[in-house]
Image (cartoon, rainbow, N blue to C red):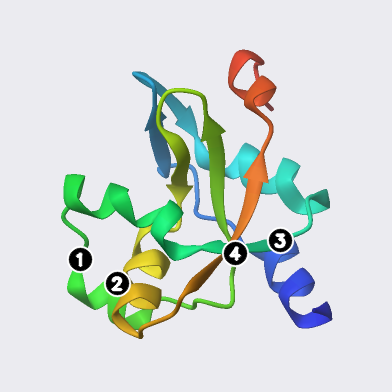
Amino acid sequence: MKIIELICESYREGDDSKFTHNGKTYQLDPFLKRSEDISPEYVPINKVDWIIKYTSPDPVRVKNANIDVPALAVNDPKWGLVVIDGLHRLVKSKELGKKSFLVKILPNEWFNEEIK
């Protein structure tokens, strides 16, 4: 698990990387940084793969995705577990026949705060 922790600590997307959740757009890197203290956990892939049908993942990014890096997810009261970063890792995991998916589940409160 130490290698995963090191990967997570240094993983950043850059200033242009954003995500939208419940109609609001957020910068991704502050969430990545703040999530460094959250332990990753495996969740059943069928709890998060519903989102794939609403997206168009880039096949090259899926091929190159590192499934050892945990995705970021939030347990949304309306939708259940929502992957906010890690779609290509999710698709690759599903294609590989994985039954579980590595995520860090972010607190819902973070989406009501200004994260810097």
- Disc 4 on helix, strand or loop? loop
**Mark 1–mark 4 contact, CB under 8 Å?**
no
Residue nearest the observer in this picture, 92 or 64? 92
Amino acid at dot 4: Pro
- Residue at mark 2: 61
Quadrant of residue 22 in the image? top left
Point out which mark residue 95 bears: none
Residue 73, percent across and down?
54, 45
Residue 68, percent across and down?
58, 78
Q: Is residue 51 left or right of residue 41?
A: left
Task: Of the two numbered discs 1 and 4 on the same chain, state the one appearing first in sequence.
Answer: 1
- Residue at mark 1: 58
- Disc 3 on helix, strand or loop? loop
Amino acid at dot 2: Arg
- Residue at mark 3: 40
Task: Of the two numbered discs 3 and 1 on the same chain, state the one appearing first in sequence.
Answer: 3
Q: Is residue 115 left or right of residue 17?
A: right
Q: CA distance from mark 4 to mark 2?
A: 16 Å
Amino acid at dot 1: Asp
**Mark 4–mark 2 contact, CB under 8 Å?**
no
**Mark 3–mark 1 contact, CB under 8 Å?**
no
Point out which mark residue 70 bears: 4
